[in-house]
Image (cartoon, rainbow, N blue to C red):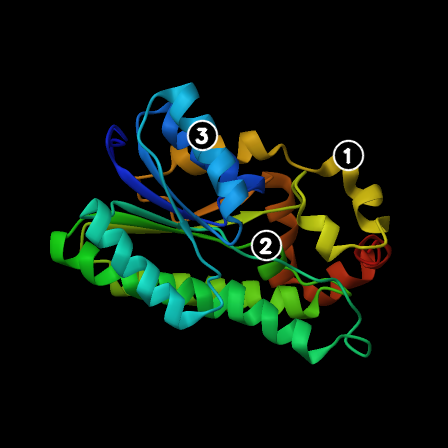
Amino acid sequence: MKRQTLAEKHIVITGASGGIGEQIAYEAASRGAVPILVARSEDKLGAVAYHIRHTYDVNCSTYTLDVSNLKEVEKVFQQIFRDVGYIDVLINNAGFGIFEDVAEAKMENMEAMFRVNVLGLIACTKMVLPHLLERNTGHIVNIASQAGKLATPKSSGYSATKHAVLGFTNSLRMELSKTNIFVTAVNPGPIKTNFFTIADTSGSYMKNVEKLMLDPKDVAKKVINVLFTNKRELNLPGWMNLGSTLYLLAPRLVEKLAGDMFHQK
């Protein structure tokens, strides 16, 4: 299907104050879209919005929100619709991870990851979806992870949340198959962002995989490229997804052959 122009398209991006969310906002603005930025940090959002307005000369609005607060999700999205009228694209990017062995992991950390990565994503989707259905157009992009396809040691909680995101995304896509609303899952490997300042406080994992890390600007460009196409999944990098696919076919073999590689956290 031919990709639509993004000029004047209203694109909501959660977790837009840094990392790939910030870069997605810049890429969208560079193509004439109207980014609607959502994140917890008002100051960081303001800085991103300032850069967008002065670099790309497009309108940009910001909303402070912790997506784990489901009541606030409802309130903020109601305000967004009052302010901008409609949403064309929702990019559910807000999320975080903490790498811990199960025996040592704190339940509050597990719960927090599920509240942000899963329940927050679902809540934002449910706020936007009725409006997309009413107009019978739009695109929902959920940022999942290769960890949602191939779990590794010390990522049990994080991988579980991303498994859930993929399950939710796949079901939603099928529910909307007879509409003009697209649904895409993005499954990146490790990206050079501040994600690891929380996920990997020891710094060992980031050091071990630094050469394999993706450029957030490149990821953002590829995410924006799939908008208004029927792309089911965007897997980055491609070779890593081959490993995930092989794991589905022969999990015991992959765990045996790649065991040492999995223990790099």
Q: In this view, does 170 lie to the left or right of 82?
A: right
**Pointer 1: what residue?**
211
Marks 2 and 3 sit apart, C-alpha to C-alpha, by: 42 Å
Closest to the observer, 43 or 13: 43
Element under disc 3: helix
Closest to the observer, 234 or 195: 195
Marks 1 and 3 sit apart, C-alpha to C-alpha, by: 32 Å
- Kindly check if marks 2 and 1 are in contact, taking CB atoms under 8 A apart as contact: no
In the rendered view of the protein, which quadrant contains the N terminus?
top left
Image point 82% across, 76% down: which residue?
Answer: 104
Percent from the top left, x then y, of residue 258? 80, 55
Percent from the top left, x then y, of residue 7? 25, 28
Percent from the top left, x then y, of residue 55? 43, 20
Amino acid, disc 1:
Lys
Disc 3 crowd, CA 10 A, few/some/many (<14, 14-19, 20+): some
**Pointer 2: what residue?**
245
Of pointers 2 and 3, the one earlier in the residue sequence: 3
Q: In this view, does 155 lie to the left or right of 33?
A: right
Tell which tag, 2 or 3, sits nearer the viewer: 3
Residue 130 vs 22, above or below: the answer is below
Residue 256 vs 212, above or below: the answer is below
Disc 1 crowd, CA 10 A, few/some/many (<14, 14-19, 20+): few
Residue 25 vs 40, above or below: the answer is above
Q: Residue furthest front?
A: 43
| Res 50 label | 3
Q: In this view, does 100 lie to the left or right of 14?
A: right
Camera sees residue 150: yes
Camera sees residue 178: no
Image point 77% across, 76% down: which residue?
Answer: 102
Of pointers 1 and 3, the one earlier in the residue sequence: 3
Disc 2 crowd, CA 10 A, few/some/many (<14, 14-19, 20+): some
Closest to the observer, 149 or 58: 58
